[in-house]
Amino acid sequence: MATPAPAFPTLNLEQAKAALAEAVAAFEIPENKEKMLAAIASCDPTNPMAKMQTLIPIVQEIQGSVMAKFGFEGPGAVMAATMQINMFAPQDPEIANGVRMLAAKLSGN
């Protein structure tokens, strides 16, 4: 029998802003920065997908503990939280900027 997908909470605008602020701050922690820079340096520069493939698990690890504070835990939690936060981007410039920054981190910039 299939395991049911985990249920995630629904964020309101203020919760989305708080989660995003913590997510952005997590990337500024020196050990997280170093981990990401080392991963980027290890990538094959001739493979355009190498950075993203290498960074996705690291980003999920870094963001997993942040998103757990907001009730997002288990498989797919980081993606579910990110999608909810992103839904507020069209109406809130602060969230739009933060989402762009997170996307840049995921691509290795």
Image (cartoon, grey):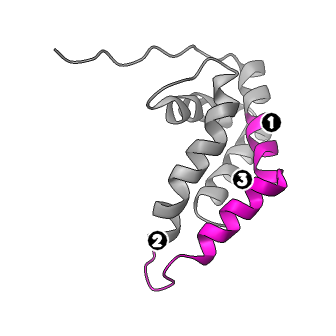
Task: Please state which of residues 106 and 66 is positioned toward the viewer in this rendering.
Answer: 66
Residue 88 visible in image: no
Q: Position of residue 73 (x, y in %)?
A: 54, 23
The amino acid pointed to by label 2 is Ala
Q: Which residues are magenta?
A: 20-48
Find disc 3 in the rendering and name its residue. 101
Q: Residue at x 60, y 67 (%)?
A: 39
Find disc 1 in the rendering and name its residue. 21
Image position of 92 (left or right of 85): right
Q: Residues within 10 Å of mark 3 (few under 14, many from 20)?
A: some
Screen quadrant of the N terminus: top left
Find disc 2 in the rendering and name its residue. 50
The amino acid pointed to by label 3 is Met
Image position of 6 (left or right of 34): left
Helix, strand or loop status at disc 2? helix
Q: Residues within 10 Å of mark 1 (few under 14, many from 20)?
A: some
Whether the magenta-drawn stretch holds residue 46 is answered as: yes
The amino acid pointed to by label 1 is Ala
Image position of 57 (left or right of 1): right
